Image (tube, rainbow, N blue to C red):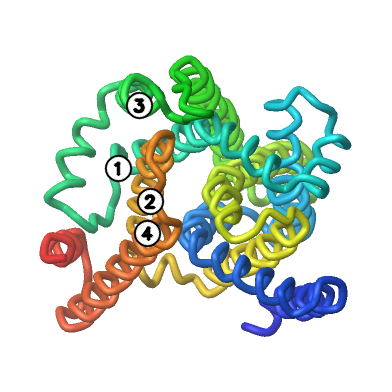
């Protein structure tokens, strides 16, 4: 099972590292390997959250996620995205941006760094909305019951998450965005940029998440209708309308996953500049790491890990909330990528340990229910 799921990842790792060693020597080999580990460590929570969405999709769309999705992730976010950012910031063409990256990597890095407030605001707001909508939703299992129970009650207020996100954005723009960067002793006010980018991130979440949820609900309605008319469905075959709705639902969930992956990629792409300015080393190293994250997502789905360890999804979403805050703080202050990675790993590890304890408590009690979940969650 492990070899089948991670086979492509192992193969691409071997080819990628061999390619790096052949064309760039041992230095390129080492940097690509380090970047791969960096991407995996920063995106483990991404895999857990992705698994929660991917488990609703069939095997075909899981393959699409691993094939077309990885092409988007590697070439789109790890190679094209930094080039586009530089092209927009410097008001030059994409080809000129690539040439700049090859001829003057220091200036290229500076342009990407200058664009960081906009990137951080966009990604931070998108991730913050994911976190807020999770904690404001009533759930069967509660990890930190003392916190999640009252938040679920507050979540009954319409559009509360949007209001809180906008408040956080305004505070960020007024505190972190002012004097976010210095150029030759001159302070630059990025407030307007942060506000605009943050609103764009919020709109992206509402649009993509809303469409995904809409078609997913329609799919569930059609499945219920098909179940009620089972005999008729057997005679006529699969309902064509169901296939169409399922396709739309899967497509928008796939789109949602890609936007989610892009948001998680921001810190990895920016953090990679702390290691190297070579865009092709970055693309290859982060791409290998992204492939493992993709494979891990599918592995979690096929093993039913989220069903067995019920608090893992909670830990991943808390990690998302922490990452959203970190991204917004990095508009002005630099935070080491190791800290970012350790926060996510620590939260997921804690939720995994709580899940293990919960499972042992349920087995010892001969059953399970919300009371056991809340008791274990409260002690964590």
Q: Earlier in the sequence, mark 1 or mark 3?
A: 1
Pointer 3 local density, CA inside 10 Å: few below 14, some 14–19, many at least 20: many
Q: Are marks 4 and 3 in contact (CB under 8 Å)?
A: no
Pointer 2 local density, CA inside 10 Å: few below 14, some 14–19, many at least 20: many
Q: Are marks 1 and 2 in contact (CB under 8 Å)?
A: yes
Pointer 1 local density, CA inside 10 Å: few below 14, some 14–19, many at least 20: many
Question: Which residue is at 59% across, 32% downward?
Answer: 115
Q: Earlier in the sequence, mark 4 or mark 3?
A: 3
Residue placed under numbered mark 3 in the picture: 172
In screen coordinates, is 28 left or right of 259?
A: right
Observer-nearest of 201 and 173: 173
Q: CA distance from mark 1 to mark 2?
A: 8 Å
Residue placed under numbered mark 4 in the picture: 339
Quadrant in the rendering for residue 112: top right
Q: What secondary structure is found at the residue carrying circle 3?
A: helix
Q: CA distance from mark 2 to mark 4?
A: 17 Å
Q: CA distance from mark 2 to mark 3?
A: 21 Å
Q: Earlier in the sequence, mark 2 or mark 3?
A: 3
In screen coordinates, is 97 left or right of 65?
A: right
Question: Which residue is at 47% across, 30% downward?
Answer: 181
Residue placed under numbered mark 2 in the picture: 317
Q: Earlier in the sequence, mark 4 or mark 1?
A: 1
Pointer 4 local density, CA inside 10 Å: few below 14, some 14–19, many at least 20: few
Q: Are marks 1 and 3 in contact (CB under 8 Å)?
A: no
In screen coordinates, is 97 left or right of 350?
A: right
Image position of 73 with respect to 214: above or below: below
Q: Quadrant of the C terminus?
A: bottom left
Q: Earlier in the sequence, mark 2 or mark 4?
A: 2
Report the number of discs: 4
Report the mark closest to the observer, 1 or 2: 2
Residue placed under numbered mark 1 in the picture: 135
């Amino acid at each position: 099972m492990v070899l089948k799921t991670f086979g492509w990842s192992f193969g691409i790792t071997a080819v990628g590292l061999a390619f790096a060693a052949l064309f760039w020597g041992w230095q390129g080999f080492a940097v690509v390997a380090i970047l791969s580990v960096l991407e995996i460590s920063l995106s483990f929570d991404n895999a857990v959250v992705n698994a929660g969405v991917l488990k609703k999709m069939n095997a075909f769309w899981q393959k699409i996620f691993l094939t077309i999705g990885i092409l988007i992730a590697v070439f789109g976010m790890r190679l094209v995205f930094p080039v586009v950012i530089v092209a927009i910031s410097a008001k030059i063409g994409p080809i000129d941006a690539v040439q700049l990256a090859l001829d003057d990597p220091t200036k290229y890095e500076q342009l990407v760094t200058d664009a960081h407030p906009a990137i951080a605001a966009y990604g931070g707001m998108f991730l913050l909305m994911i976190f807020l909508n999770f904690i404001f939703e009533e759930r069967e299992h509660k990890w930190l019951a003392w916190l999640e129970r009252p938040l679920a009650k507050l979540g009954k207020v319409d559009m509360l998450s949007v209001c809180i996100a906008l408040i956080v954005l305004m505070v960020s723009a007024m505190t972190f965005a002012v004097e976010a960067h210095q150029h030759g002793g001159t302070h630059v006010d990025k407030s307007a940029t942060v506000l605009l980018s943050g609103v764009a991130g919020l709109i992206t979440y509402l649009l993509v998440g809303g469409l995904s949820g809409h078609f997913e609900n329609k799919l569930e309605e059609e499945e219920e209708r098909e179940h009620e008319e089972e005999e008729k469905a057997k005679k006529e075959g699969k309902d064509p309308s169901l296939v169409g709705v399922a396709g739309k639902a899967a497509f928008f969930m796939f789109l949602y996953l890609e936007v989610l992956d892009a948001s998680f990629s921001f810190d990895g792409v920016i953090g990679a500049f702390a290691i190297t300015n070579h865009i092709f080393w970055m693309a290859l190293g982060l791409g290998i790491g992204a492939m493992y994250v993709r494979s891990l997502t599918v592995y979690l789905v096929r093993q039913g890990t989220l069903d067995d360890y019920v608090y893992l999804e909670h830990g991943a979403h808390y990690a998302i909330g922490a990452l959203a805050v970190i991204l917004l703080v990095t508009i002005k202050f630099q935070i080491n990528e190791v800290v970012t990675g350790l926060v996510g790993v620590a939260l997921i590890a804690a939720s995994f340990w709580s899940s293990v304890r919960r499972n042992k408590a349920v087995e010892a009690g001969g059953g399970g229910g919300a009371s056991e979940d809340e008791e274990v969650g409260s002690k964590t």
